[in-house]
Structures are given as C-alpha cells and as structure tokens.
C-alpha cells in the first residue's frame, strides 16, 4: 500500500488475461513489472521500467541494465508490480552480474510471490518458447498512463522457437524468435510447460526486411549467479510433456490394457475349461473307483452270506439249533449289507456335480487372493513416469497408510463417490490446489495439482475454509457427505491440471 501511496496513484483493475495454455498462465503469476521511480519537484516520476520474475517468494530476477539507473544514486527507487492482486512493493538490488546482464532484487516490504521453476535440461533447436513480460510499445498502444503501469496488469505473451544456443558478450544465451520489445528486458523465456529457460535481454535490429532475433540469458548463467548469491531456486530437469500427449498415451495404454484384459479373460476361460475337464476326469475316475469298491464289497458280502447260510444248514442238520440260528442271522445281515453297498454306490450323474464343486473351490481361492490385494495397510507407491506429467515438482516415491474407511496416514479423510476415493486440499500456505484419488483394489494413486490465478485461488480457498472434513473413522456415510461437499471445490477447477502424478502402490512395510 505504501508503494501506491508513494506514487499518489489510485489502484486500477488489472486487464483481463488472454486465453493461454494452463502452464503459461500459471508461470505468468511469477512475472512482475520492475519500475524505477524518481522524484521531480517533490512528485514521483516514472524513470523507466522492465520485467522480472520471482526465483524465491521475495527475490526477483531481472536484467542488470534494467536496474542500472537505481544503482547510480539520485534517489531512484525500485518498485515491484505483480501481475495480479491489488498492490505492489518496493525492493532493493542485492546482487548484480554485469557481464551476464543479471540482477537480483529483494522485496523490502512484506510480500510473497509464487517462485518460477528453472529448467536445467537441454533446450533443443526448434523448440517452442514463450516470452513473457511488459513491452513498452504495448503500453503506448493501449494509452496506459503512469497509474496503469504501476498497477497489477497481466503480462504480454509472445510465441516463437529456439534458433540456437549462442555465446554473446562473454555469457551464454539462447537465440529465439519470440518477439520482445523495450520493457520485456528481465522477463522470462518459457518452455511450453511454463519453466524458465532464459532471461530475455536484447535483440537484433531489423533493417530493410531483415528478420529480427532475440537473445535470452541461459539457465546455466542464472544458476551460477544464483549460487553465488546464496539463492536456491526451484529447478527441474524433467522434459516437458503436453497434456494432449499424456491423454493420447493414456488412451493407448487403456486400449492395450483392454486387449490384454480380453486376452487374459480368454486365457482364464480356457484355463477354467481345462480345469473343469480335468476335474470331470478326476471325478469320473473317483466315481468309477467308488462304484467298483462298493460292487466288490457287495460281492464279498454275498459270498460270506452264502457261506453263512450253508453253515447254518449244516448246523441245523447236526441238531445244533442255536449255532444254526446265529449263522442264518449273520447270512441275512450280510445280504442286507450287500444290498446296501449295491444301492448306495455313486451314480455317474455325480461326476458333473463333483467336478463343479472342485472348480468352485478353486475360484474361491482366486477371489480370496484378489481381495487380499485390497486389504488395509501400508502401501509403497512408486511414481509411474510413463503415465505422469511433471512440470515443476521434484518426483519422489511415497508411502501411504490406508484404512478401509478412506483414512490416509491416520489424519487425512478421503471422500467417497461413485468414482472412488478422492481428497481436495487448498491450504493457504501453498500456491496450488491438490486433488488426490486412490483405488485400493488396483493400487493406483493419482495426485493432480492446479496453479490458479489470484482471484480463482482466493474464492476457492474461501470455500475450502468453510469445508470441515470429518475426522478419520467417520464411516462411509460421512465419507460420502465429504465428497458431496468437495464437489463445490472441484467445480471451480480448470478442466485440466498443471501436473498429474500417477503412482503404482504395492502393499509392503514402511521404509526405515
């Protein structure tokens, strides 16, 4: 506020941003206008301006030639105007590398900006790039006055391609064709994922139809300068993947998975048929063996009954009536036993039922094995780079302690909906909104991050603060209520996330 009051200028509403890819729009949150403010006759005057971007929440990277007038004294102050919000801050130069045309400004007032991410990988010739900044000719064309210039305004984005890496003025640069003008100096040159690959510094002069080219100080020069200044930036060396590429690859993966599933289903069906045929053969052999055993038993019983009957007749002839009756009774019992063995022998109709029961038992074992994969416990989750789109995060595996009621790590309650378990988080301390989802059965964990503009983020966080997530263990009904409440937050998110991290989770013990 003191910055605006010092200029005696009213705050103005920012110009609406043009429709840009989500990553360029997200990266533009880090871009600022660097204004030099003098004093003439007791009135603040605009001496000049350039562009810059945050490399830490309170540190701005720009060109050395942008802040050079402020280093010569004369009462010139440096103002930092963000691309969104309601005001700006003053800052001071803390480091300069004249030979590389780089400078760092630290905010002297309490303020915070989302830091940009520097790309440390190789930049290929022909790569698409975007220059972001505040060219003065656009300000003039729009008729902006000093009050407009020192008010938050969306930066200008221009597109081009990388022509080559060059060494110029004893420092490494990137030659490109994304148009920049006076005022773009110090602004970032971005790749298509919104990572900084250079600091726009100067350009050629077109004359008599000559093409114009532009130079950006390379990331390697920036990193050397930042290390020497004890500033640790956010970096990544992971190549850029477009959402379209990711969605195409995912569609191909799902199509391949469907084919594999169908092949597996056919193989399983053939295996089940073979198992049934084997079970039928085994059941048939068992029934035949049982029938033969019963028939043999009946035959033996009949032979013994015949012997007992004959013995009884001889005993009766000998006048031994008591022994004759016992032998006759034994013969009758043996005949009844033979008859029972004959009648109770298994029929061939039992073959099918015995085989079906055997196959059913094997199916239960298979289902039990699958169900065991979805058990509660600790999961070790490995990032699947083939299915992920990483733009600014450092990829790392994670551990997940999961409870059947949707409780993660003993403190985060997931909401339950028709498409499974999901959790939305939008803490004030972070510059992004995260949506996590987990499927315990397949072990698939997905984390998506959205980098929102200032107004959308403020509205979403206001709704998030109203949301009171139930404590872990509230049961499925409360989990469903939480998911319903989260729907208001997800409705405010863009169609596509800036990052999508997909993990393959396997049950295991936590790392020690």
Image: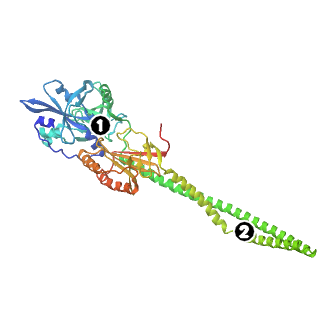
Which of the 4 image quadrants contains residue 381?
A: top left
Q: Is residue 288 above or below residue 48?
A: below
Q: Is residue 357 above or below residue 34?
A: below
Comparing 420 with 49, the one in front is: 420
Residue nearest the viewer, comparing 239 with 180: 239
Cα separation between marks 1 and 2? 84 Å
Rendered residue at 64%/63% (across/down): 355
- Residue sitting at x 35%, y 51%: 470
Q: Nearer the viewer, residue 197 or 339?
A: 339
**Closer to the eye: label 1 or 2:** 2
Kindly identify which numbered label has been placed on residue 116.
1
Residue in the picture at 92% in, 75% down: 319
Query: Can the viewer see residue 455?
Result: yes
Left or right placement of residue 354 versus residue 411 in this view: right
Q: Residues within 10 Å of mark 2 (few under 14, many from 20)?
A: some
State which quadrant residue 119 falls in.
Answer: top left
Q: In the picture shown, does residue 231 fall above or below 273?
A: above
């Amino acid at each position: 506020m003191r910055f605006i009051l010092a200029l005696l200028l009213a705050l103005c509403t920012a110009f609406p941003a043009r429709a840009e890819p989500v990553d360029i729009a997200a990266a533009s949150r880090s871009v600022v206008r660097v204004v030099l403010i003098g004093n003439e006759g007791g009135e603040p005057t605009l001496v000049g301006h350039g562009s810059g971007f945050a490399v830490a929440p309170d540190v701005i990277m720009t060109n050395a030639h942008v802040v050079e007038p402020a280093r010569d004294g004369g009462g010139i102050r440096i103002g930092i105007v963000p691309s969104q919000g309601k005001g700006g801050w003053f800052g001071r130069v803390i480091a300069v590398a004249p030979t590389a045309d780089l400078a760092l400004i630290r905010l002297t007032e309490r303020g915070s900006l989302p830091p940009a991410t520097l790309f440390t990988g190789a930049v290929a010739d022909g790569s698409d790039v975007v220059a972001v900044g505040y060219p003065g000719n656009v300000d003039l064309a729009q008729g902006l006055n000093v009050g407009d210039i020192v008010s938050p305004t969306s930066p200008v984005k221009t597109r081009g391609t990388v022509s080559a890496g060059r060494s110029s003025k004893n420092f490494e640069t990137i030659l490109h064709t994304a148009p920049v003008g006076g005022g773009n100096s110090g602004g970032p040159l971005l790749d298509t994922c919104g990572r900084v690959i250079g600091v726009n510094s100067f350009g050629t002069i077109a004359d008599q139809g000559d093409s114009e080219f532009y130079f950006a100080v390379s990331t390697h020069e920036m990193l050397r300068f930042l290390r020497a200044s004890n500033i640790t930036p956010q970096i990544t060396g992971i190549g850029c993947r477009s959402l379209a590429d990711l969605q195409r690859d995912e569609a191909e993966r799902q199509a391949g998975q469907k084919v594999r599933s169908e092949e597996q289903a056919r193989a399983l069906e053939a295996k089940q048929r073979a198992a049934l045929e084997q079970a039928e053969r085994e059941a048939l052999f068992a029934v035949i063996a049982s029938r033969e055993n019963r028939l043999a038993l009946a035959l033996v019983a009949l032979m013994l009954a015949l012997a007992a009957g004959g013995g009884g007749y001889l005993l009766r002839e000998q006048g031994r009536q008591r022994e004759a009756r016992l032998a006759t009774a034994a013969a009758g019992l043996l005949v009844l036993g033979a008859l029972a063995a004959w009648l109770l022998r298994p029929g061939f109709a039992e073959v099918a039922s015995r085989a079906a029961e055997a196959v059913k038992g094997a199916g239960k074992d298979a289902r039990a094995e699958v169900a065991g994969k979805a058990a509660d416990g600790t999961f070790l989750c490995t990032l699947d780079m083939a299915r992920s789109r990483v733009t600014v995060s450092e990829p790392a595996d994670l551990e997940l302690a999961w409870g059947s009621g949707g409780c993660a790590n003993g403190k985060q309650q997931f909401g339950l909906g028709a498409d499974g378990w999901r959790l939305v988080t939008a803490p004030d301390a972070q510059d992004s909104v995260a949506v996590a989802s987990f499927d315990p059965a397949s072990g698939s964990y997905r984390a998506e991050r959205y980098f929102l503009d200032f107004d959308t983020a403020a509205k979403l966080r206001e709704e998030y603060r109203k949301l009171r997530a139930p404590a872990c263990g509230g049961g499925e009904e409360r989990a469903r209520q939480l998911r319903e409440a989260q729907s208001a937050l997800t409705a405010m998110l863009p169609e596509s996330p800036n990052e999508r991290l997909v993990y393959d989770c396997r049950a295991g013990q936590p790392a020690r």
